[in-house]
Amino acid sequence: MKIKLKAMYRKFTLLTVSVVVIVLYNCTTNTIDEGDVEDLPPIQEVVTYEDDVQAIIVTNCVNCHSGPNANAGLQLTSYVNVRAAAEQGNLVNRINNAANPMPPSGQLPPETRQIIDQWVADGYLQN
Ligand code: HEC
């Protein structure tokens, strides 16, 4: 009887350890998933302003970067001015700047920033 109990305890301990290991493993994996653009698989499709970039800018930037009171005097309302900001370098620097990000509320997900990076790398295609 005593021996059987010991065996049960051992099985239980093994089960507990397995669960802890699996939980810890998943936590680690999640951290990697939330990693940065470099951790993502490369984008295979062609990225263009009209198909991909414009929607990101309209959703996340235009509120503050349009009209007569645009923040930092920066207009992000057309292909031409978004491209100019990206070519100058500030736009890409700021969206990827964890300490001082744009939008100021916090960095966009890596998948979104990767699209902008790819657009720049592909040469700012319009459509
Ligand atoms: C809530 C308002 C707000 C939103 C949303 C916002 N910005 Fe800004 N942005 C600012 C303010 C304020 C500044 C000026 C202060 C600073 O540089 O932090 C600024 C500055 C910048 C600058 C630097 C301009 C310069 O000449 O130094 C860039 C580039 C920029 N924003 C890009 C973006 C992009 C791209 C997005 C969207 C992904 C975005 N911003 C979203 C408020 C905003």
Image (cartoon, rainbow, N blue to C red):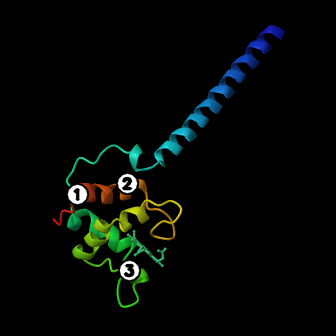
Q: Read off the residue under disc 3.
A: 65
> Which residue lies most toward the bottom here?
68
Query: Is residue 122 positioned above or below 16 on the image?
Result: below
Around disc 2, counting alpha carbons within 10 Å, would you say few (fewer than 14), some (14 to 19), or many (20 or more)?
some
Residue with the mark numbered 2 = 111
Residue type, label 3: His
Asked if the residue at tag 2 contacts the one at tag 3, i.e. Cβ–Cβ closer than 8 Å, the answer is no
Image location of residue 68, percent across then percent down: 36, 91
Asked if residue 104 is positioned above or below residue 16 in the image, the reply reads below
Mark found first going from the N terminus, 3 or 1 = 1
Q: Is residue 50 visible?
A: yes
In this view, 33 is above or below 95: above
Q: Earlier in the sequence, mark 3 or mark 2?
A: 3
Is residue 44 left or right of 9 when viewed as pictured? left
Q: Is mark 1 within 8 Å of ligand 1?
A: no
Q: Residue at x 40, y 62 (%)?
A: 93
Residue sticking out furthest to the front: 88
Mark 2 near ligand 1 (CB under 8 Å)? Answer: no
Q: Is residue 1 visible?
A: no
> Is label 3 in a helix, a strand or a loop?
loop
Label 2 to label 1: alpha-carbon separation: 13 Å
Give coordinates of residue 49: x percent, y percent.
23, 66
Q: Is residue 28 left or right of residue 127?
A: right
Which residue does the numbered mark 1 point to in the structure image?
47
Q: Quadrant of residue 102?
A: bottom left
